[in-house]
Amino acid sequence: EDQVTQSPEALRLQEGESSSLNCSYTVSGLRGLFWYRQDPGKGPEFLFTLYSAGEEKEKERLKATLTKKESFLHITAPKPEDSATYLCAVQEGDSSYKLIFGSGTRLLVRP
Amino acid sequence: DAGVIQSPRHEVTEMGQEVTLRCKPISGHNSLFWYRQTMMRGLELLIYFNNNVPIDDSGMPEDRFSAKMPNASFSTLKIQPSEPRDSAVYFCASRGLAGNNEQFFGPGTRLTVL
């Protein structure tokens, strides 16, 4: 069964304390891996798409990387405004549309 | 540019009542998705429309749920009759023609069925 597992479930960081969130997946052929940010009471906000192992993408303090089994979202020198739930989703090879979402990592950055 | 628009943002109803959720996708997008988010099950795809045609409704939990997309700028998700276990946040998302699968979500409707 296709699965997407995110860890940790929750993460507390001090402002400026860099860390990484993990998304491991088991799908029959990866067509794309997506990272979203979700603030309380809002819909998921698209961040990145990764397509192949070795690919990296960056946006401000965030960098997403991809291997054949997992993806990491690295957060460098986070600020309190980075506090949110980060969701990972995978699209398997034989689907043009279906995303399988993980349960998310709740990140809290304290000033 | 306006993003995906959903209404109402909050809905409280009693068991047995009909509930209609509304969505306006991003202009020019040709794919529309309805999702449900709960603490227990996370984000789940309910139904997928492409060019206003339902392509995959395998995620619709029961016959009590129905969705329509009468034109490219409007979709509804209806629950009739509603039950307490339908309480969740319902999201609409849309996707453009670019060939990737970047889906853009609306703000959601928080449904509470008493």
Image (tube, coloured by chain):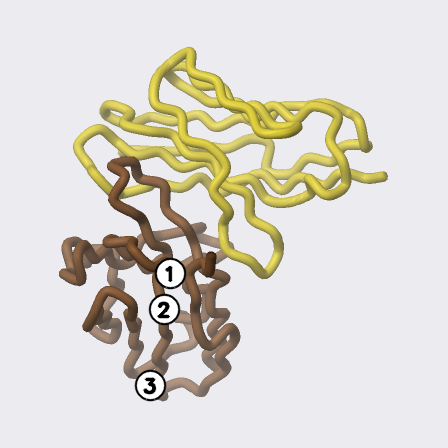
Quarter of the image that includes the N terminus of chain A: top left
Looking at the rendered structure, whether the residues under marks 2 and 1 are on a common chain is answered as yes
Q: Nearer the viewer, residue A55 or B18?
A: A55
Q: Looking at this view, name the residue that lies furthest to the front.
A: B1
- A15 left or right of A58 in image: right
- Label 3 marks a residue whose chain is B
Q: Earlier in the sequence, mark 2 or mark 1?
A: 2
Residue at 29% across / 70% down in the picture? B74
Q: Please tell me which residue is depicted at 33% across the width and 29% down the height of the picture.
A: A32
Q: Earlier in the sequence, mark 3 or mark 2?
A: 3
- Of all chains, the one bearing label 2 is B
Marks 2/1 in contact by CB < 8 Å: the verdict is: yes
Q: Residue at x 27, y 39 (%)?
A: B98
Mark 2 secondary-structure assignment: strand
Quadrant housing the C terminus of chain A:
top right
How much space separates mark 2 and mark 1, taking CA atoms?
6 Å
Tint applied to chain A in the drawing = yellow
Which three-letter amino acid code belongs to the residue tagged 3? Glu
Relative to B89, is A89 above or below? above
Q: Answer yes or no: do the residues labelled 3 and 1 have beta carbons within 8 Å?
A: no
Q: The residue marked by circle 1 belongs to what chain?
A: B
Spot the brown chain and give its letter: B
Q: Nearer the viewer, residue B28 or A45?
A: B28
Q: Quadrant of residue A7?
A: top right
- Asked whether the beta carbons under mark 3 and mark 2 sit within 8 Å of each other, the answer is no
Q: Is there one chain holding both mark 3 and mark 2?
A: yes
Distance, label 3 to label 2, CA atoms, is 17 Å
The residue identified by callout 2 is: B23
Q: At which x and y percent is residue A40?
A: 62, 56
In this image, A69 relative to B31: left or right?
Answer: right
Identify residue for label 1: B92
